[in-house]
Image (cartoon, rainbow, N blue to C red):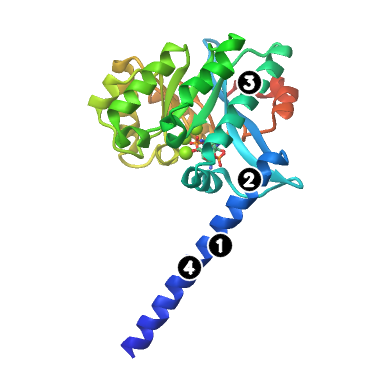
Amino acid sequence: EVKEKEKGGFLFFSQEIEKKNKKFREIETGLRRALVNNELRLYIQPIFRESNNGEFVITKGELLLRWIRNNRIVYPPDEFIKVAEKNGMIVDVGNWILKEAYRIRQKLIEKGIYIDLCINISAKQLENKDFLNNIKYLFDEKNILENWIFEITENVLIRDFNISTHIFKEVKKLGIKIALDDFGTGYSSINYLSQLPIDYIKIDRSFISKAGQDGFNGVILAITSMAKSLGVKTVAEGVENKEQLKLLRNLGCDEFQGYFFSKPIDVEEFIRNLNLLNKIKI
Ligand code: C2E
Ligand code: MG
Ligand code: MG
Ligand code: MG
C-alpha cells in the first residue's frame, strides 16, 4: 500500500514538473514574438503625496510591464519576467522598457505633465555589464537624466553587496534616484541600508495590507522612523482603502500608491483622467 502511494506521489510530482516546463517554453517562445509583435506595454500607476491643504497630488508614476494580445493579458509580469531572467531575455526586454519609458516621458512632457517616472529594474539587468552604458546611451544623450527613479528589489542586495553598492553609486552619479522595492520581504539590514545611496523605500504590500492588525502598526512605524533617520522617503504600496491611507499617513509614510487611487492604467488613459486622479481629498 505504501508503495502505491509513493508511486502516485512521484507521478504527480513529475506531471507537475512537466507542466511547469511546458509553461516555461510557452512563455519563452511567446515572449520572443511579443517583442517583435509589439505585445508589450508599459502601464502607469500614479503615486501620491499629501499637500498642505490635504489634497493628495501625483508626484510620480510607476511604469509596470504588461503583455497584451487581443486586449487580454497573456501572462502577468512576475511570471514572464522570471522566465526572461532565467533565459537572459530580460536584457532585451529591459532595453525595450527603457526606450519605451523614454517615449512615455516625451509624451507626458508634450502634455505639460511633469512627474517622476519609476522603472522596475531586475537584478539580472543590473548585473549585465552593459547596463550602465545602455542607460547612458539611451538617456544621457537626450539630456533627461533627472526625474527618473529606478526601483530595485531588496533581494539584489544579498546577491553581492559590493557590486550592488558600486552600481547604485554609478546610477546615482547619472542623476537617477533609487527606490528599494518590496521592502521588508528580503534580508537587508540597517547596516546595509545606511551604506547605500537610496532615496526611497517602498514598503511591501504584505505589510500595508496588515496595517491596523496587531503588531503591524509598530512594524510600519519602525520602518518609517528608520527611514527618516537615514534621510530616506517611504512609499506605501498597495493602499486599497481610505482607512489604510489615514493610518499609514499617521504612521509616517510619505507617499502612497494603490488601488484606492488607481490601478495601473494605459498611459493615454492616465493622461485623459489626470484631472480626476489628481487632488483627491479624504
Ligand atoms: P512591484 O514593482 O512591487 O509592483 C507593484 C505591484 O503591485 C504591481 O503588480 C501592481 O499592479 C500591484 N498593485 C499596486 N497597487 C495595488 C493594490 O492596491 N492592491 C493590489 N492587490 N496590488 C496592487 P504587477 O503590475 O502585476 O507587477 C508585479 C511585479 O512584476 C512588480 O512588482 C515587479 O516586481 C514586476 N514588474 C512589473 N513590471 C516590471 C518591469 O517593467 N520590469 C521589471 N524588471 N519588473 C517588473
Ligand atoms: Mg516596483
Ligand atoms: Mg513593490
Ligand atoms: Mg513586487
**Residue 22 — which label?**
1
**Residue 102 — which label?**
3
* Residue named by callout 2: 32
Q: Amino acid at mark 1?
A: Lys
User: Of marks 1 and 2, which one's residue comes earlier in the chain?
Assistant: 1
Looking at the rendered structure, the secondary structure element under dot 1 is helix
Distance from label 4 to label 3 (Cα)?
41 Å
Looking at the rendered structure, the secondary structure element under dot 4 is helix
Q: Residue at x 53, y 23 (%)?
A: 134
User: Disc 3 vs disc 2: which is toward the camera?
Assistant: 2
User: Disc 4 vs disc 1: which is toward the camera?
Assistant: 1
Contact, mark 3 vs mark 2 (Cβ under 8 Å):
no
Nearest the camera: 173 or 249?
Answer: 173
Looking at the picture, does residue 51 appear above or below residue 35? Answer: above
Q: Amino acid at mark 4?
A: Glu
Nearest the camera: 269 or 246?
Answer: 269
At which x and y percent is residue 119?
A: 53, 27
**Residue 16 — which label?**
4
Counting other residues with Cα less than 10 Å from the Cα at mark 3, is it few (<14), some (14-19), or many (20 or more)? some
